[in-house]
Image: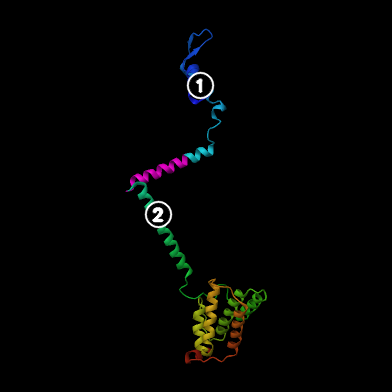
Amino acid sequence: MTAGGRVAVLALQFGGVHLGGDDVPVRTPRVPAREAAERELSDPRYHQHDPNPLQRALNWLWQRVDDLFSAAAGATPGGWVGLLVIALVVLLLVVALRLRLGALRRTPTTGATLFTDRPRTAAEHRTAAEAHAARNDWTAAVQERMRAIVLALEERALLTPAPGRTADEAAAESGRAFPGHADRLRAAARTFDALTYGRHLGTAEEYARLSALDTDLARAKPELTTDRAGAAG
């Protein structure tokens, strides 16, 4: 039965007129008629195709969103077209800002900091480097070997201990004491930075070069300036 048919039936049955057995109209009070109609309409067969609670909630939400956009479009010059243009401009600005900030975070202004954990000796860093190398973890092995090189020079009073020193700074300072190894020191610092910033993974060849540099510096005699000689003395 259609909705119109149900309404007609309810109007006849509960709206105040009912045809009795002798076709004599009988008046029904208004309140009982309304209650009878509500009972009739509460029958589940009338609600088989009603949306479920989730569908009703979604329909309400989308209606509110549509109302919101309609109001925004009405207040925007150009209506819907103007609103879409503004939304596109805002989206492009957000993307550009995100890319710019991401690039700033990824681009280092200085070299990587050498030491980030508790102080250790050069020998401890060499031991850690060898342990990483034994596991073929060449990135960590190279990093630890570079730290061992710098700490060994600090322990010999050829470098002044400086928290937050970068690999580039350490290489530049060490190169003044060992000018014959300055190029190798700078190359080691560049390798350390590349590994620390994830530009590539360490290799066995890089570890071998830093290990050889560590050994050569331990045997080399520094060229001390007057100030450096006084500090070493």
| Circle 1 crowding by C-alpha within 10 Å: few under 14, some 14–19, many from 20 | some
Work out whether 175 lies above or below 26. below
Pointer 1 residue:
37
As helix, strand or loop, the secondary structure at mark 2 comes to helix
Q: Which residue is mark 2?
A: 88
Tag 2 near tag 1, CB within 8 Å: no
Is 121 included in the stretch rendered in magenta? no
As rendered, which of 89 and 195 lies closer to the eye?
89
Q: Amino acid at mark 1?
A: Ala
Q: Where does the magenta region start and end?
A: 60-77
> Can you tell which quarter of the image residue 134 is in?
bottom right
Place residue 200 in its image quadrant. bottom right
Of tags 2 and 1, the one toward the viewer is 2
In this view of the protein, can residue 189 be seen by the observer? yes
Say whether residue 74 is magenta: yes
Q: Is residue 21 above or below residue 66?
A: above
Classified by dominant secondary structure, the portion drawn in magenta counts as: helix
Question: Which element is circle 1 on?
Answer: helix
Instruction: Point out residue 102 in the picture as x, y percentages from the top left corner.
Output: 46, 65
